[in-house]
Image (cartoon, rainbow, N blue to C red):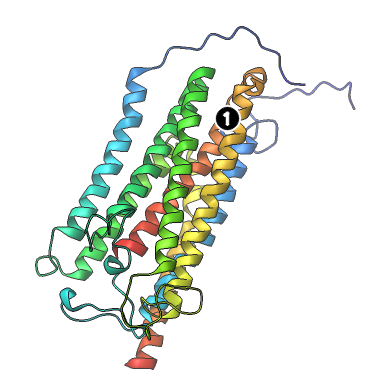
Amino acid sequence: MEQQTTNITPQPADKAKIWGIWKVMLILLAVTAVEFIIALAIPESILPKPVKVYTYIGLTLVKAFYIVGEFMHLSHEKKSLIWSILLPIVFIGFMMFIFLYQGQAIYNALFG
Amino acid sequence: MASTAVVVDDKDENIWGGGTEPMKSSYGKLMMWFFLLSDAFTFSALLITYGLIRFKSPAFEGDVADFAFSPDRWPLPDFVFNAFPGSHALGVDHAPLVFVGIMTFVLILSSVTMVLAVEAGHRMDRKAVEKWMLWTILGGFTFLGCQAWEWSHFIEGIHVDDLNIFQGANLSQNQYGPPNFAALFFFITGFHGFHVFSGVVLNFIIFYQTTVGILERRGTYEMVEKVGLYWHFVDLVWVFVFTFFYLV
């Protein structure tokens, strides 16, 4: 059943496209480097722990955006596909809110 | 009726009526996306469990310089994961994030080589697909090797002179913090490591199919794209594990 094709000549690579891929990698590395600098070089007297934590989460979402959008190509898919992947993620947000709130409540019951 | 001709009126055609790809994405790719969505829920459940247990446990308060391990409070990750292979021999006692930084770098790099393999597949360039798939597999093995070292270091523990203190970690007790700390480490990084392992196996199968020319004869390298989606997802999960286990 498989289509028989012989003597295939590969098309030449598009330099701009290849550079675009490496550019995404540089962005990911740069964001990771920023996380390292915040973790190792900036003391908590300048950036309090909660500020650091929210910065880490924000930078993680930036990395997630580039991995899913560019590497997994989701940004260039049809809108209906983008939404059918992104909308169910709302449940994860809800789960996060409800369980972290619960964890705090258990702490208060045990040690508060 | 096999002999009946089907006339499709383009103007009234319903894209969900069959015969077309409504999301302009093949069946296989679409199913991979929905599998990955369900996998995202599994990993989220594990990471949120980590969050809940950490929130319900007492945290270390005070100056970082005074930190010591105790089963009564959650440890600071910088003091648990602070070594790399040979760091003790070099006399480096405290090197937080160095080794896990290398692991992150390896995984991001192998994601890039995967994208390059997919791109080469679009151009029907068999030699380039082989090359980049091989680099991706190599990256996967490197990451797994690092993970194995990380685990053995975690299980062996940090040397203490007091024989009454339990050294190292297992599923029921550990020297770093509450028992759940090690249990969550084993479950979350283990589940992720198993995904990496499956990814390497899938990548190898596709690499093999490329080298023997199966994909070229098929006329499309879409299989590279499908395992590529899975491989990037593994990278994506690591980005989150890295943040919540090692940074926060």
Q: Nearer the viewer, residue A101 or B106?
A: B106
Please tell me in which quadrant of the rendered image residue B54 appears: bottom left
Viewport quadrant of the C terminus of chain A: bottom left
Residue B242, percent from left and from top:
36, 57
Q: Nearer the viewer, residue B108 or A14?
A: B108
| Chain letter for mark 1 | B
Furthest residue toward left? A46
Quick check: A40 left or right of B147?
left
Instruction: Determine whether B154 is above or below B109 in the image.
Output: below
Could you tell me which residue is drawn at 45 percent across and 79 percent down? B179
Instruction: Determine whether B218 is above or below A5 in the image.
Output: below
Quick check: A34 left or right of B45?
left
Residue B180, percent from left and from top:
45, 77
Could you tell me which residue is drawn at 32 percent across and 37 percent down? A25
Q: What element carries label 1?
A: helix
Instruction: Determine whether A81 is above or below B213 in the image.
Output: below
- Category of crowding for the residue at label 1, using alpha-carbon neighbours closer than 10 angstroms: few (below 14), some (14–19), many (at least 20): many
Residue B23 can be seen in this image: no
Amino acid type at circle 1 is: Phe
Query: What residue would you read off at disc 1?
Result: B207
Residue B140, percent from left and from top:
47, 42
Could you tell me which residue is drawn at 63 percent across and 23 percent down? B215
Residue B201, percent from left and from top:
59, 41
